[in-house]
Image (tube, grey):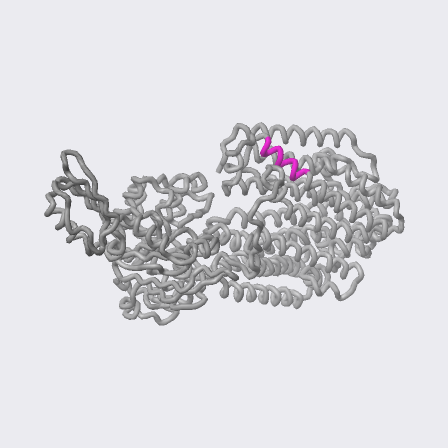
Amino acid sequence: MSRWGLDAMLAVQLRTAWRTIAGWVLGIVAGMVVTVTALRGTYGTPEEIAAYARTVGTGPAIRMLNGNVAGIDSFGGIVANEFGFIASFALPVMGIALVCRLTRREEEAGRLELLLASPISRHAPLTGALVITVAAALATAAGCAVVMIAEGVAGRSAVAYALAIAALVIVFAGLAAVAAQVFEHTRAAWGAALAAAVAAYVVRGVGAARETPLVWASPMGWFDEVRAMGEPRWWPLAISLAAATALFATAFALAARRDLGSSMLPVRRAPARASRLLVRPFGLAVHERRGAIAGWAGAAVVVMAMYGLLARQVVEALRDNPTLRELRGIGADVGVDQALAMFALVLAMVMSGAAVQLAGGWRRAEDDGQVEIELAGRGSRVRWLGVQAVVVAAGLLVIGFAGALSLGVSVAVSMGDAGIVARTLVACAAYVPAAAVMLGLCVAAFGLAPRLQTAVWGLFAAAVVVGYLGPGIGLASWVVRLSPFAAVGKVPSEPLARGGAAALVAAAVVLTAAGIAGFRRRDVPTG
Amino acid sequence: MEDEGEPLAPRDITGAAMSDAPPIHIDGLVKRFGHTVALDGLDLSVSRGEVHGFLGPNGAGKSTTIRVLLGLMRADAGRVELFGADPWRDAVPLHRRLAYVPGDVTLWPGLSGGQCIDVLARAHGGIDETRRDALIARFALDPAKRSRDYSKGNRQKVSLIAALAADVDLLILDEPTSGLDPLMMEAFQSCVRERQAAGCTVLLSSHILAEVEALADRVSIIRAGRTVTSGSLADLRRHTRTRVRAVTERPPEGLDRPGVGDLAVGAADGGRVDVRLSADADAVPAVVAALERAGIHTLTVTPPSLDEVFLHTYADGGAPAGDAGDAGDGA
């Protein structure tokens, strides 16, 4: 081991990234704790469980969103179904985040150059990332298994489900490992791997909704086909393992062949002169964020189209399932508006996630010294941060509009009613204040407490959990209303909560102003 | 070179074979980035125990050459040997014997300078702790400060301390003093001399000529990916002219000879003669003798500075130096 410097490499990786690693493991286990304890309260009796199975278990819409969950007539099955939404996104992102963080990011920053000039093999960074990610995936699995067993899920099922969790993380880690060899920049590697995750989600969703073998084309299908909560089968785990092995082998082969700092894809040449727009602060800010904005808009279009095309089935599922309505806090009078409210909420979450991610770029620019250079010019700090905030805000509107249009058209197709398009756009607009608050939080963090900027992700996650699961898990309604996503009300099935929306807008304005004021006073760069 | 007896596996690079081979030997190295030719038949030879200056304008390919030597990049053609072994294939065992300081040091922003040194030391498999502490004092580094709060010079110091404290046979330094103040450059120079006295070979890439002049035994000058010239500083100086200025009692005779140029004779105060000229190294003795015969009042002989050698070499080369372009410097 030490012959290749792997122990030294692991020591460096653990020492510099342990917070990220621990954050992912604890975050996902915490998600499981919240899900399991909440469901334990709602589905305490066999009758309640049977009711859930009868109604939710048969709906293609829910299968589309959460996959085809086996053993839905057990408490474990309900857990798997409700955790399925988190699992579908958080687990792939965990694998991608850890591998990108440990490999391409360090290479791009130039830190690997220093380390690889030591007696550390060029395979060590990737090997270390593999070891750490697998260990983190297994730790997450162990934590989830303990939580499930403690709350009464059968041991065999809990272990199978936990192993499937680990396998899903590892497959996407392998995918990210390949992306990290193919692309020179961390951002591009992230983007490619995330796009693959979204594609895998769509493929699994379509396959599960129609109950076709298409699910086998997606790693998330392999996850479901373990059928942990039904009669667990172990062999789909072997498919995940084989895929991960093949992906990592590919990554190692590519890494062995290339120069440090290079990529398999050549870096494109760029214009030698800046355009008239680019030399202005606004143009520069647009240039820096446009790729990410386009990526988020694309993802919003795909995900919203997928939801929208299932509108009819969702409406039917909601109509037939009082427990599901209770879980989502929906009244008995079900129409397309109830489904639209659910979808619009998801779009608001996408916009808010985009806000946090796009605003994270400011902090990176500060770390890289770009902010200093720009502030050394003629523009003031207020103007700089103001322009940045406006560009991100405009980007959020683009993302929101793209998603809303995609949703409206697809719902209209599914329901056979063209009038829905306009109603969808209006409904989605009601959720803009929620995203605005998230952006305000980012500005405030950047200006007042730049070291805490990444903590906004935690607030985002909390708002999502409270806003999405809150009504179902019996949180007091005032707690639920604290989530920006719930504060505007369930538009369009309920009228816009004017007070809530106004409060959100006011909060966004105050936070932004406070952030800009703080930015005027603070040191640049603040380490 | 002392072989500490540690295993140099996995490949058979025996201590004996490695000790006899020159630390660095490059013959006709070619490296392309797409259509850009960054290195175009570069030669470089560094013998044991010398400090070798590696000079060239921006984008000439210095950093690319060093990355090939470190096995971070792969040569497209040519022979590259580090202690007689292949730097790509045998990267790990070779790296036990060398330490590297990059031109642009990036550290882990959340760690302190002292922690960064320890991380690098750990990666290297250990450094001389006493020397580490002495170097921290010598470079006046605050090791408890987070590295994101360091200036460029301080980041450079972290990397220098880690490299200089390692017990190695070869130091590869890529513009190591960029960002250091003159006092610290002084400290750096004495440290390098100490390492050299301890038997260490040094490859010093730089375009600070005074530094190379102060440290280097031999230099190689490269340009657009090729070696333009290589040799001792004395050798290089022979190719450029020494400037001579004298005030003599009488008009000198016999100065109009091969090897003498820019001759200007004028009047000086007190009926004396002001003489200015430039001379090839070979012609200097004859010029001084002729001035002596004319009765020297004052005499200034200025040897060519390395700057002049440098400018002379660059200006005489073939194609414009920009060709190797960004690829050479940035990749």
Which of A492/A295 is in front? A295
Q: Which residues are magenta?
A: A383-393
In the picture provided, is B181 more to the left or to the right than B149?
A: left
Question: What residue is rendered at 85% in x and 49% in y?
Answer: A412
| One can see residue A98 in this view | no
Residue A444, image x and y in percent? 60, 33
Residue B95, image x and y in percent? 37, 60
Image-quadrant location for residue B125: bottom left
Principal secondary structure, stretch drawn in magenta: helix
Q: Is residue B117 above or below residue B268?
A: below
Q: Is residue A515 magenta?
A: no
Question: What residue is rendered at 71% in x and 31% in y?
Answer: A505
Q: Is residue A361 above or below residue B164?
A: above
Question: What residue is rendered at 35% in x and 42% in y?
Answer: B180
Which of A240/A377 is in front? A377
In the picture provided, is B213 more to the left or to the right than A446?
A: left
Which of A192/A71 is in front? A192
| One can see residue B252 in this view | yes
Which of A241/A478 is in front? A241
Image-quadrant location for residue A242: bottom right
Q: Residue furthest bottom?
A: B12
Residue A276, image x and y in percent? 61, 41
